[in-house]
Image (spheres, rainbow, N blue to C red):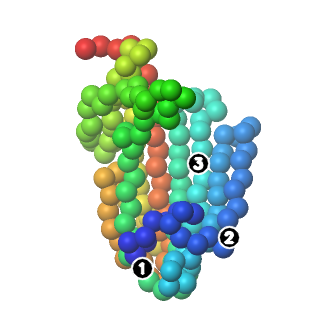
Amino acid sequence: VEGMSLSIAGMNCPGHERFLNMKKGILGRTSTFKDILNRRYSYRSIRFAGMEDKRLGFLEAEFVPLDSSCSVEITSGINYGINNRPILGESNKRFFRVREIGREGKLEFLITDTLGKMHSICYWSCTECAISGRFRRISDYGFRVRLKKGQKMVLRKLFFVQRFPYNE
């Protein structure tokens, strides 16, 4: 938002509430952020993991600038540059390698190969955005938008993870 990260580490957060429902597989939060110019932003998110099919997940995030218009840059992708934290005496280990990143129709995907257990994992996702009520599919690679004071933006992301035996 206006070049700053919308996060507890990146902005002042005078209001923050989280909830978790393990029976339904829902994690949510409602936050109010304040930037260095004291402009406030409302953020609400709900994450859902499939209880019947654990390969499915869903995220919905709602963002509203409360005090003035603002520029928002959205990036919504898989961060495959993360390593596991080392155990005492170990160095950072990579447990997978990226085989392919691409798009098939309106779905974006990432295929990785695990290095230890020899499995391939495919992550599929589809993201859509609504500003003033109308949803449209967007790229996971990111976009920018200008919102007016009080204008609501809603992002929805559906994802699916599938594991396969490793093939060269």
How far separated are the C-alphas under marks 3 and 1?
25 Å
Q: Nearer the viewer, residue 139 or 91?
A: 91
Picture mark count: 3
Q: Is residue 121 above or below residue 41?
A: above
The quarter of the picture where residue 165 lies is: top left
Residue 54, position in %: x, y? 57, 30
Q: Amino acid at mark 1?
A: Cys
Residue 2, position in %: x, y? 40, 75
Q: Quadrant of the C terminus?
A: top left
The quarter of the picture where residue 42 lies is: bottom right
Q: Quadrant of the N terminus?
A: bottom left
How far separated are the C-alphas under marks 1 and 2?
20 Å
Q: Residue furthest front?
A: 89
Q: Earlier in the sequence, mark 3 or mark 1?
A: 3
Q: Earlier in the sequence, mark 1 or mark 2?
A: 2
Q: Rate crowding at label 3 as few (under 14), some (14 to 19) or many (20 or more) other CA atoms within 10 Å.
A: some
Q: What residue does disc 2 label?
A: 15
Q: Nearer the viewer, residue 98 or 25?
A: 98
Q: Is residue 76 above or below residue 110?
A: below
Q: Earlier in the sequence, mark 2 or mark 3?
A: 2
Q: Is residue 155 visible?
A: yes
Mark 3: secondary structure = strand
Residue for point 32% across, 28% down: 97
Q: Amino acid at mark 3?
A: Arg
Mark 2: secondary structure = strand
Q: What residue does disc 1 label?
A: 70
How far separated are the C-alphas under marks 2 and 3?
19 Å
Q: Amino acid at mark 2?
A: Gly
Residue 17, position in %: x, y? 70, 61
Residue for point 36% across, 40% down: 81
Mark 1: secondary structure = strand
Q: What residue does disc 3 label?
A: 47
